[in-house]
Amino acid sequence: MDQSKGFWKQINEGLHDMCYIWAKETANTVKDEGVLIFCVLVPLLYPLLYSWAYNNEVVREVPVAVVDMNNSATSRQFIRMYDASPDTKVAYKCNDMTEAKDLVQKQVVDGIVLVPADFDIRLGRMQQSSIAVYCDMSLMLTYKAIYQTAQAVASQMNEKIQIALSGNHTDREDQITTQPLAFEEVQIFNPTGGYGSFIIPSVLMLIIQQTLVLGIGLSAGTARENNRYQDLVPISRHYNGLFRIVLGKSLCYFMIYAVIAAYLTLVIPKIFGFTSIFRTSDLIGLMLPYILACIFFGMFVSCIVRYRENVMLLVVFATVPLMFLSGASWPQSSIPGYWQGFSWLFPSTFGIRGFIRMNSMGATLQDVAQEYQALWILVVVYFLATCAVYRYQIIHTRRHALERLETLKQRAAAIKQKRNNESNQQGMPAV
């Protein structure tokens, strides 16, 4: 009976401590403007801005400057075909690259097409020629329009050259020469062929991880800068309360990001009409380990953050590489093995892959079992790693407190001894 009472007493104490740390961490989050901005305002506003920028999916009549150094009938034909495309418009014909660069700097055009001086000569010699394309990468929609239009026009001209050299006698022979296998290109899981439906799902998942790391890192950096060790790692009664500390702090961020994740995965695609064909139950099953893995990953990373500004530089630097390593914007099969192994350290890798397959391909939780299991493994790994680091910080904090207390005792003893000496010299009784 006594053992049973002791067990339930320990459970009650654990829940009380965990809720106390949860409430204290929530209060610190609300009071810290930086943490509040990155954990609440950025996840709410940034997806709206990013989705609005790519809401058109495709763009038309993108202005381009052309530098024709060849000025031949063939080069002029290429320029006419390029201008006839619905995606691009030849807005300016420049004499040299300097003039074209000035137009790009003034944001009059979004790209440059350069026809080299030996363009027609090399084609006449039956040699491969080239067209140089320079694009403004600030908006991927314009880059896609300028680059893909140049590829399409080059392919059409290549077909005409191929027909002229084949010596065919009928149209059917020309058709077989240029297209020996008839096919129809259909973009699976992206019927509009737009950039928004292609990249926005991965961006939304990456926002969850990056803002969590920013918010937790800012909170930890602030505690270190102000020497508030009790806010960095609250000291419980015993070392067996370590799980209470980690779980209490993580509950604060889980409470916030359960709402944020629902907003990003359900509301944003609905507002902008992006592809969304997942089942809600499967999405909840995937988001649970993903949010937990991101929280423990952020808590682990925050232990190496000394100043608030450091975490901003770290997150900004890692955002683009993590996007490529996830396999969303770069083919996963083309990523080297050692980089794929490195990408497994980040929850965003498996979260993005699983969410894209659910959101755009209609996959179920069983279909993304590999990503689902990997996320739970990361939850356990980063939870234990966070506990280990927090244990070290608890020992360091207690040692620091004991050293400070010992220093205060020595200082008080020195002051008392000094007063006694002064009293003895004056012939007064010692205090």
Image (cartoon, rainbow, N blue to C red):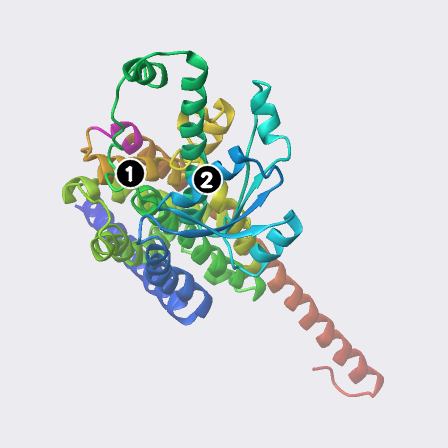
Residue occupying the far right of the picture: 425
In terms of depth relative to the viewer, which is nearer, 51 or 42?
Answer: 51
Q: Position of residue 26 (x, y in %)?
A: 35, 64
Q: To which residue does mark 2 refer?
A: 147
Q: Position of residue 58 (x, y in %)?
A: 33, 48
Is residue 385 in view from this perspective?
no
Q: In the displayed structure, would residue 17 be above or below residue 409?
A: above
Q: Residue at x 44, y 56 (%)?
A: 216
In terms of depth relative to the viewer, which is nearer, 85 or 218?
Answer: 85
Please tell me whether mark 1 or mark 2 is closer to you in this view.
2
Asked whether residue 370 is drawn in magenta, I would say yes
In terms of depth relative to the viewer, which is nearer, 181 or 305?
Answer: 181
Q: Residue at x 25, y 26 (%)?
A: 184
Rate crowding at label 1 as few (under 14), some (14 to 19) or many (20 or more) other CA atoms within 10 Å.
many
Which amino acid type is marked by label 1? Ile
Q: To which residue does mark 1 refer?
A: 356
Rate crowding at label 2 as few (under 14), some (14 to 19) or many (20 or more) other CA atoms within 10 Å.
some
Magenta residues, start to end: 367-372
Tell me the tag on residue 30: none
Q: Is residue 87 left or right of residue 283?
A: right
Q: Is residue 290 left or right of residue 90?
A: left
